[in-house]
Image: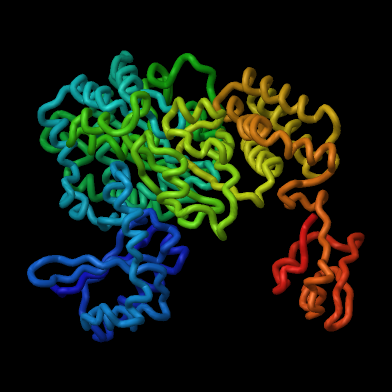
Amino acid sequence: MSNLKIVIGQGSCGIAAGAAKVYDAIENAIKDGKFDAELSITGCIGMCYLEPIADVFTEENGEVVKRTYVQLNGKDAEEVFTLIAQGDFENEKVKKYEISEEDKNNLKSQTRVALRNCGNIDPESIDAYIATGGYEALKKVVSGMTQEDVIDVIKVSGLAGRGGAGFPTWFKWNAAKSSPGEEKYLICNADEGDPGAFMDRAVIEGDPHTLIEGMLIGAYAIGAKEAIVYVRAEYPLAIIRLKNAIKQANERGYLGDNIMGSNFSCKMRIKAGAGAFVCGEETALIESLEGQRGMPRLKPPFPAASGYFQKPSNINNVETFANVAWIINNGGEAFAAMGTQDSKGTKVFALTGKINKGGLVEIPMGSTLRDVIYGIGGGIRDNKKFKAVQMGGPSGGCIPADLLDTVIDYKKLSATGAIMGSGGMVVMDESTCMVDMARFFLDFTAKESCGKCAHCRLGTKRMLEILERIVNGEGKDGDIELLEELCVSIKDGALCGLGQTAPNPVLTTLKYFRHEYEAHIYDKKCPAGQCRSLVTYTIDADKCKGCTLCARQCPVQAISGSVKNPHVIDTEKCIKCGKCIANCKFGAISVN
């Protein structure tokens, strides 16, 4: 075996950034005999902004030394790793790609439970998972714990469902276990639909066996003999790796009949969903599993009593199950020791939007939004001013800058009008129009409404129409009050969580950014300069050098002027596409 081991991050984010090309370049160099190395893959470590990422392991003075290289490209990969294979770590070309101390510390500052193996093991190797202590928790459960014992450990841990509702996991498990009947089902909700959220995808792609082990422990606790993973079809790599992991687990005796020689038997299968946002709601998901159109059921009865084909069923999301094996191995007390009085353990967040260091982070509950956005996230891109963060996806709400020190737990976030949700954090800067942001999320929920109840089907559509009028400069007196009235009606009358939470982005932007709505309606101005119908592009004659670049780039010939003389924009012709601003090198064009 070679003294040099190279591990390339091959999550979806890494592949999209060019990791496959880096892998191919290194593999070809090894085949061509340019250097000798052991080459393998891993999942996403969470630092998506640094992809493609490679970890290099060498043995030096009897110890294994790890070095990390980031933002690699296929063009330089062969030369860089040839130098590394020669031990030339101080070469300027090699140092160029070495990870910074700041980024290393950002990773060290996290507390990783659900993501403990992501980016550290080969997701396609069951042996790599077993080497980390994988399936030891399952062995502990089936060889010496009762169903009640397992549920008690989860109860002590305080683990709440990480899919958004934050409902106590032990309570759901106990309800399903206590329901009469021999035929029971355990279901994993991997239908991750929030814009900007990719926590579940990363876990499945990077550590599929931890999901399988957590689900098997849950199945044992409730008495289920079949487990189903409902995953969105838009996650092809996650599905491929999960299928491979299920096959390996079956071959090793961790799935199937008499698991590990016990009386516990359980099989597992995957259901690829068509990507309907409403199927994130558990009863709509069950309808889809049964082959019906994904639409929510009236509750009660709850799935624990009458779920999949009217049999007792339990549903948790990927991140919830990803915590289970760790809790069994380390004890419920260890998990409960992290977090706050009301929210135990850690939480994974997907950082996206106008932030310097986007990706996945896992932190203990009780950290603040500032800790995440300005600490691990590195602050706002281009040194712009932080304006708000959308928490909980389309079902969540906007939290403004003056609440940046809000503690991250279920109660504290709910008090702001937002929700924890599944863990999406969409960061917005001063250039974001909050009215248009609310319109964006309403557009999403209106389109994703299943149409079963009138409050959601019609109410979200009417709200969207009002918001579209406002951003188009056609808002009128009374629109704000009508929006507020519709919000209350929809929240009170909608059948499921999608409709009940759909008004949240509007309610929170009205609460914290009402002045922006008023500016759009009464002043016919967009304070952020984003709504095309409400802005005017002008050229500052003192700054314009007459280079003609803006005129040449304008698709409608709305800019005129001679060389070396100030230019002028014809506002009647201008379509406000922004090409002039993007190409002006002198900052002469402004939006008013």
Q: What colour-coding does the image apply?
A: rainbow
The residue drawn where x is 67% and y is 39% is 438
Q: Residue furthest front?
A: 542
Q: Is residue 372 visible?
A: yes
Residue 434 falls left or right of residue 239: right
* Residue at figure coordinates x 36%, y 20% from the top left: 312
Please say if 500 is above or below 19. Answer: above
Q: Is residue 177 above or below residue 333?
A: above
Residue at the farthest left position = 62
Please provide percent x and percent y for residue 376. 41, 51
- Lateral position of residue 69 relative to residue 126, left or right: right
The image position of residue 441, as x and y in percent, is: 63, 40
Q: Tell me if residue 290 can be seen.
A: no
- Residue 499 lies, with reference to residue 56, above or below; the image says above
Looking at the rendered image, the quarter that the C terminus falls into is bottom right
| Coordinates of residue 352 in the picture (x, y in percent) | 51, 50
| Left or right relative to 418: residue 267 | left
Rendering quarter of residue 120: bottom left
Asked whether 102 or 30 is in front, the reply is 102
List x then y, in percent, for residue 581.
73, 66
Q: As drawn, is 197 to the left or to the right of 217? A: right
Q: Residue at x 43, y 33 (%)?
A: 407
Q: How many marks?
A: 0
Residue at 33% from the left image edge and 49% from the top image edge: 243
| Quadrant of image for the N terminus | bottom left
Q: Quadrant of residue 295?
A: top right
